[in-house]
Image (spheres, grey):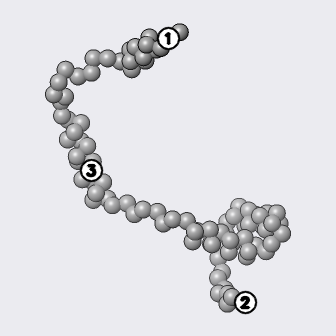
Amino acid sequence: MVRMIRKQILLSPKQHALVKRRARELDVSEADVLRDRVDAIAREEAPLKLDKKAWARERRYIMTRIGLKSEGPGRDWTREELYDERLARIPR
C-alpha cells in the first residue's frame, strides 16, 4: 500500500455537501473523492504564465497601429455585395 500523508483542510459548507454527495454517488469515501480531484489536477496542463511586460509592448504596438491612416482608397465594397456577386454566379 502507498504511504499516505495526512492533511487537514477546511471546506465551505457548500464544498462539504458536494464532496459528501459525490462520495455517496460513487460509493467511495470522501477522501477518495478528494484524492481523485488532486490526481485530475496533476493530469491538467499547466496554465501559461502571463508576461505583463510582453503584453505592455504588444498594447503599445496595437495603439500605434490604430493611430495609422490607411494608405490607399480603402475598402469600397461590402460583405453583402460580395455574397450577392458570388450567388449571382451560381446557376439556378
Q: Which residue in the protein does label 1 denote?
A: 91
Query: Does residue 67 sit above or below 61 in this rendering?
Result: above
> Rounded to the nearest whole Å, what is the CA distance between mark 2 and mark 3?
52 Å
Q: Residues within 10 Å of mark 2 (few under 14, many from 20)?
A: few
Q: Are marks 3 and 1 in contact (CB under 8 Å)?
A: no
Disc 1 to disc 2, C-alpha distance: 73 Å
Which residue is at 65% across, 69% downward?
Answer: 37
Position of 1 relative to 53 (above/below): below
Out of 54 and 16, give the one closest to the viewer: 54
Name the kind of residue labelled 3 in the image. Answer: Glu
Element at label 2 = loop
Tell me which amino acid carries mark 1: Pro
Reply above or below: 81 against 4: above
**For discs 2 and 3, the disc positioned in front in the rendered view:** 2
Secondary structure under the numbered disc 1 in the rendered image: loop
Label 3 Cα neighbours within 10 Å, binned few <14 / some 14-19 / many ≥20: few
Label 3: state its secondary structure: helix
Residue drawn at x 48%, y 66% as measured from the top left: 46
Identified at 32% across, 59% down, the residue is 52
Residue type at mark 2? Met
Which corner quadrant holds the N terminus?
bottom right
Residue 58, numbered label: 3
71 relative to 50, above or below: above
Query: Sequence order check: which comes first, mark 2 or mark 3?
Result: 2
Coordinates of residue 91 in the picture (x, y in percent) = 49, 11
Density class for disc 1 (Cα within 10 Å; few <14, some 14-19, many ≥20) is few
Residue 77 quadrant: top left
Q: Mark 3 or mark 1, which is nearer to you?
A: 1
Q: Closer to the N terminus: mark 3 or mark 1?
A: 3
Q: Which residue is mark 2?
A: 1
The front one of 20 and 83 is 83
Residue 89 seen by the camera: yes
